[in-house]
Amino acid sequence: MNIFVASLPFSVDDQELRELFEPYGEVSSCKVIFDRDRNRSKGFGFVEMDDEAAANTAIAALHESSYQGRDIVVKVAEERPKRNNRF
């Protein structure tokens, strides 16, 4: 299951995000999204967990919880709408 995590502190990196979710189950991938121009976090990221039950437990436990002084948003990631690449 792909999980969206928002309102992260800008200092959080991939490893810290992974460590936040690992108590709930195995994390298969983890990525904090960076702004290329500023070379800093955009304040959100994605976590992939193969075990759906563990992912749902993590979402329930972490949504609206405080992490490094910020209330984070944790929910199932929505599919990205297809872009129309007409020029």
Image (tube, grey):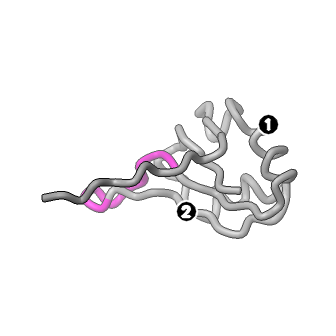
Residue occupying the point 52% across, 43% down: 9
Give the number of the disc on residue 60: 1
Secondary element under disc 2, as helix, strand or loop, is strand
Q: Nearer the viewer, residue 63 or 52?
A: 52
Give the number of the disc on residue 31: 2
Residue occupying the point 53% across, 50% down: 79
Image-quadrant location for residue 86: bottom left
Could you say where residue 84 lies in the image, as x and y percent from the top left?
Answer: 28, 54
Q: Which residues are magenta?
A: 36-44
Q: Is residue 42 magenta?
A: yes
- Quadrant of the frame with the C terminus: bottom left
Could you say where residue 46 lies in the image, as x and y percent from the top left?
Answer: 58, 55
Could you say where residue 44 lies in the image, as x and y percent from the top left?
Answer: 50, 47
Q: CA distance from mark 2 to mark 1?
A: 20 Å
Give the left or right position of residue 81, taking residue 23 as reference. Answer: left
Image-quadrant location for residue 35: bottom left
